Image: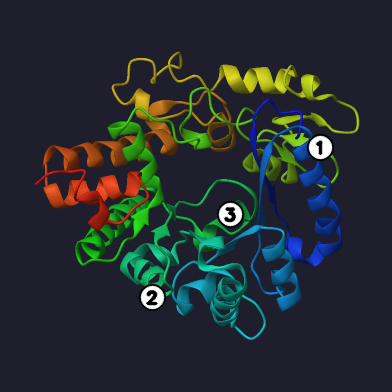
Amino acid sequence: MMKSPAKHLTMELQGGEPLLAMDVIRHMVPYARKRAKDLNKELNIVVTTNLANATDDILKYLRDENIKVSTSLDGPAFIHNANRPRPGNNSYEITIEQIERARQILGRDRVAALMTTTQLSLTHPKEIIDEYVRQGFHSIFLRPLSPYGFAVKSKKRTGYRLNSFLNFYLTGLSHILEINRGGYNLAEVYTKILLTKILTPYGTGFVDLQSPAGAGISVLVYNYDGDVYATDESRMLAEMGDHTFRLGSVHTHSHTNLFTSDSFLKLVSASCNQSLPGCSDCALQTYCGADPVFHHSSQGDSVGHRPSSDFCNRNMSIIKHLFGLIAENDIERMRIFFSWIHNCGIQDISKMVPS
């Protein structure tokens, strides 16, 4: 990881549940920090955890090592408990209690939450969003299920069609805008990413919407056995027996070997949307991406067939909707949008967007 040419690195520790391996974390963190310092690199560390096993001692360690926490919150109790069952049916209660404990020890800005949209979620966008407001979060990522890992195994119980997700997303976005109009700052993350691409000259670093895709270039995943994958999604494919996007192993391959492997070169060639069929002449190409891992998993081909691609149709629908909102030139809404892009409150953006 430290051989990356990037000056700014993020090391994200995932699982399973990484807090069950605190001995490994305590070994990795000081070593990684020393290596980063020796190489004049800036290193951020994030732990992705359900927080169930986060004792005060563990949280104080994370605080002292300046480690951020990312956890899961799928909505109110009836949704979160259904999505993440455990004995006692109290997954939600534990999560809320532990989020508050983590905030008290680490600080509110060091604890983030992500939600996953399941079949149950689709008819409750407002309840999910209101839960994030109730818990004091100022961003929410309305994420669809991905065709990998556990999501595939539980598809009959949790899966849905694209149109159902789009209805959920657009209803949710409308509710979020109303919440902002009421004075509470809440950004929808995917909308924010797309608006940044549409309304500013700046990149976002979001892997799925880069060309070539950020898979392998902006992110690498090191598995517990030393195998290296282009993305977490490609690691999940490997768990299902598909090693198409395995770039190599830290035990047998150098950093250079990983980036000259056939797997990596094929990945890059299938992720430049300027030259892909169905993308090269698309008016929305600048704001979109390609995601060859998604298309390999869902269509059996890394390039994919755009007319039948959920990735393509989802992004086209959302981007067109955003252009429609922008064209309406609602000043209050545009202030909200720019407040998301600039990571500030709508009150602060008023000076930047005249009435």
Q: Nearer the viewer, residue 249 or 108?
A: 108
Residue at image x 28%, y 33%?
199
For mark 2, does the 10 Å Cα neighbourhood hold few (<14), some (14 to 19), or many (20 or more) residues?
A: few
In the drawing, what numbered circle is on residue 151?
A: 3
Residue at image x 18%, y 40%?
326
Q: Work out how far the residue at label 1 is from the one at label 2, CA to CA, in angstroms.
A: 41 Å
Res. 274 image quadrant: top left
Res. 353 image quadrant: top left
For mark 3, does the 10 Å Cα neighbourhood hold few (<14), some (14 to 19), or many (20 or more) residues?
A: some
Q: Amino acid at mark 1?
A: Asp
Q: How many marks?
A: 3
- Say if 129 sits above or below 100 in the image: above
Q: Nearer the viewer, residue 115 or 155?
A: 115
Quadrant of the snapshot with the N terminus: top right
Mark 2 = which residue?
134
- Say if 274 sits above or below 240 in the image: above
- Say if 90 sits above or below 144 in the image: below
Question: Which element type, helix, strand or loop, lies under badge 2?
Answer: helix
Q: Sequence order check: which comes first, mark 2 or mark 3?
A: 2
In the drawing, what numbered circle is on residue 227?
A: 1
Q: Amino acid at mark 2?
A: Arg
Q: Nearer the viewer, residue 212 or 163?
A: 212
Residue at image x 66%, y 17%?
265
Residue 178 in the figure: left or right of residue 69: left
Q: Position of residue 218 (x, y in %)?
A: 60, 32
Q: Amino acid at mark 3?
A: Ala
Q: Nearer the viewer, residue 349 or 341?
A: 349
